[in-house]
Image (cartoon, coloured by chain):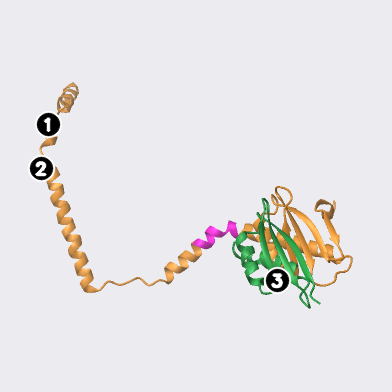
Amino acid sequence: MKLNKIINHSINLENNEIIFSLNTKIYPQEIIYKTCYTFIDRMYVYLDSLKKNEIIVSLKSKEKLTKKQPESLKDEFLNELLNILIREAVSKKNQKFLEYIIGGAITASLEKPEMKKENKKEGMDKVEKEIEFLKKELGKIECSEDYKKDPLNIKKIFKDYEKRK
Amino acid sequence: MKKENKQFLKFHNKLYSLESLKKAIKAYEKIAKFKLIKEKKYAVVEIKVLSFNQNENIGDEFKNYALFLNIQSL
């Protein structure tokens, strides 16, 4: 089956114009926009929508067209549409991969900041103070007598178990 | 002789943002008079051109520029 029969079009030679509709389920709106952008300098592009999931594209040449030219314009548009669609799909697929490569390259290119001697000493002092503080806190927990209380009688259960052995 | 040329252009709300239409109107306001009418599905732009030797394709040019601005704003 010819593509022309699938995507119907109407040609207005007086206006040098071809009008056809596209299904947005196959060609998303964003892809249609991007394709229009590549044509906008050569011809007048107009979009409309009469149904849901359908965009009507009107391509109007800035120059006089012959009988067959409007159809070739449409074919060119459809080719570009497919081209952009595939490019987008590939770039989406490789996006994570590219992010990793670029991220790695940026990180590798960055110089590691060196600490000044004074800052280094200050930093070490802070760390030592923190260690001391944590040691004291740990000592407090170890020294508390709470663990000697045995409200659940675990000691007894444990002793009984040992005896049975 | 001055000949008044009036055009009505319809822009679907899903395809053309109001902002891009307003920007396009601002860019063309020295060439023609514009009126923006908001409808349910469409924004209608009324263009009045005083044509001595004015470009007859002002409507098409306007449509193109509105689409260009719309794509740029994405």
* Real-space Cα separation, disc 3 to disc 2, in angstroms: 90 Å
- Which residue was labeled with disc 2? A143
Quarter of the figure with residue A85: bottom right
Mark 3 lies on residue: B32
Which color has been applied to chain B in this rendered view?
Answer: green
The color chain A is rendered in: orange
Q: Which residue has dot 1 on it? A: A149
Q: Which quadrant does the C terminus of chain A fall into?
A: top left
Magenta residues? A91-99
Q: Are marks 1 and 2 in contact (CB under 8 Å)?
A: no
B11 shown above or below A139: below
In the orientation shown, which residue stands out farthest toward the top?
A: A164
Relative image position of residue A30 (x, y in whole percent): 64, 58
- In the displayed structure, would residue A64 be above or below residue A10? below
Tell me the SS state at disc 3. strand
Secondary element at image label 1: loop
- The numbered disc on residue A157 is none
> Could you tell me residue A55's position as x and y percent?
72, 54
**Separation of marks 1 and 2 at Cα, in angstroms:** 13 Å
Give the amino acid type for the residue marked by disc 3 in the picture. Answer: Ala
